[in-house]
Amino acid sequence: MRDPQSLDKQYLWHPFTQMQDWLENEQLVIEKGKGIYLYDTKGQRYIDGISSLWVTVHGHRHQELNRAITKQLNKVAHTTLLGLANLPSIELAEKLIKISPPGLKKVFFSDNGSTAVEIALKIAFQYQQLKGYKDKKSFLTLVNAYHGDTIGSVSVGGIDLFHKIYKPLLFKAFKAPAPYCYRCPLGLDKKNCKMSCLNCVERILKKHHSKIAAMIVEPMIQAAAGMLTMPGGYLKAIRALCSKYDVLLICDEVATGFGRTGKMFACEQEGISPDLMCVAKGVTGGYLPLAATLTSQKIFDAFLGEISEQKTFFHGHTYTGNPLACAAAIANLELFKKDKTLNKIKSKINFMEKELKTFHDLKSVGDIRQCGFMVGIELVKDKETKEEFPYEARIGHRVILEARKRGAILRPLGDVIVLMPPLSINQKQLQELLSITYESIKEIPA
Ligand SMILES: *Cc1c(COP(=O)(O)O)cnc(C)c1O
């Protein structure tokens, strides 16, 4: 191939990227991966510190995942789920239900996190319509939420930087302040706030529940907002409030699912079951695009009826239940068992927690948030006042360029440095990733 970097610059438009900046700067082109490492076209090796945008679970080019996909490829690459069934989607659906929180009984497949959310929203809305709650047309979401980039999922999103320009296109949703304890929206202190932000959720539910079909949350941690962790008990309280006010609960486990928080699903951290659950990212171990929306029996049953009643869920994507992606997902789940991934991760989470404490020595580290294998290190200009760096200083971006020089690929969320390595990383590799991150943050000029 001619110089791949210049071809990229000639033909591609990259996601979430200011292309002027991209075109002006040196860019990496990745050629291959193995285990926790990525290799660029110049042969440089990097630790994949963000699991290729939060998806890789057991590592790259894993023999068993490769084998499972090849085996399916020798049968058939794709057949439709519209009016037909296929073997891998059946096997995967059963496996997903078996590992999911109790009460989730049915699986609706799609191909990315945003569609999994769109489907949950449409199902919740239609469910309420079918049940005769005609006014339940709206949704409740949290400030700082991220549920994907399609218009529906942006409508329940709450990150102004990404979402504000699209406002005229969006449907209206109720927004409650979310727990961002480092910068509490209510100006309270975590030590004695008694989770007052829950009262804001309850106030909205009390007043508007007859208009709200469902509440949607990222369980335990608002990831894209900057790894904002929820205090213990918050999620459980949200579940109770939704039940109390007859509002469905949608848990968006797209980022948190498949071991990321230390349990298979983040909902398990608080022993709750949502009415609808969205999964994507890690479902195929980071191999192929696949997503699923899981629902309770009650919701599924509401859509049953004679053809003439037109209660059908009229929604579907062309690649729904793609056999190759499902085969990868089945192999991913089998590896969790075989490698005892969820057992082994515990000591690595503790190790990371202990090591991260030393980061507080760095003058720019304002807050460190961790939920299992999801870490956000918030950098600030002034520790005392929590004053932020100016947006255009791109401090987060500068840190990740430093990390590259030292052999790790990271991607920040603004000035929050994210660590989300593959679950298969060993302690020694984790130590290396942490030292690279520490050294890179240390380079921030005074
Ligand atoms: C990434 C993400 C999505 C969107 O998934 P895509 O596959 O990028 O469409 C939705 N919700 C959460 C919580 C996510 O982290």
Image (tube, rainbow, N blue to C red):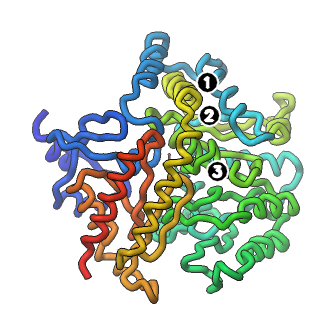
Calculate the distance from the C-alpha at mark 2 to the C-alpha at mark 1: 8 Å
Which quadrant is home to the C terminus? bottom left
Identity of the residue drawn at 51% across and 43% down: 281
Residue 381 visible in this rendered orientation of the protein: yes
Q: Earlier in the sequence, mark 3 or mark 1?
A: 1
Dot 2: few (<14), some (14–19), or many (≥20) neighbours within 10 Å? many
Residue 333, position as x, y percentages in the image: 57, 30
Residue depicted at x 61% and y 24%: 89
Q: Position of residue 432 (x, y in %)?
A: 32, 52
- Residue under numbered circle 3: 266
Q: Is residue 14 above or below residue 437?
A: above
Q: CA distance from mark 3 to mark 1?
A: 24 Å
Q: From the viewer's perspective, is residue 279 above or below residue 61?
A: below
Query: Which of pointers 3 and 1 indicates the residue nearer the eye?
Result: 3
| Residue to which mark 2 is pinned | 109
Mark 2 vs 1, N-terminal side: 1
SS state under label 1? helix
> Percent position (x, y) of residue 385?
45, 89
How far apart marks 2 and 3 lie (CA) works out to 20 Å
Q: Is residue 379 left or right of residue 216?
A: left
For discs 2 and 3, the disc positioned in front in the rendered view: 3
The N terminus, quarter of image:
top left
Label 3 lies in ligand 1 vicinity (Cβ under 8 Å):
no
In the figure, residue 247 lies in which quadrant? bottom right
Q: Of helix, strand and loop, which one carries label 2?
A: strand
Q: Are marks 2 and 3 in contact (CB under 8 Å)?
A: no
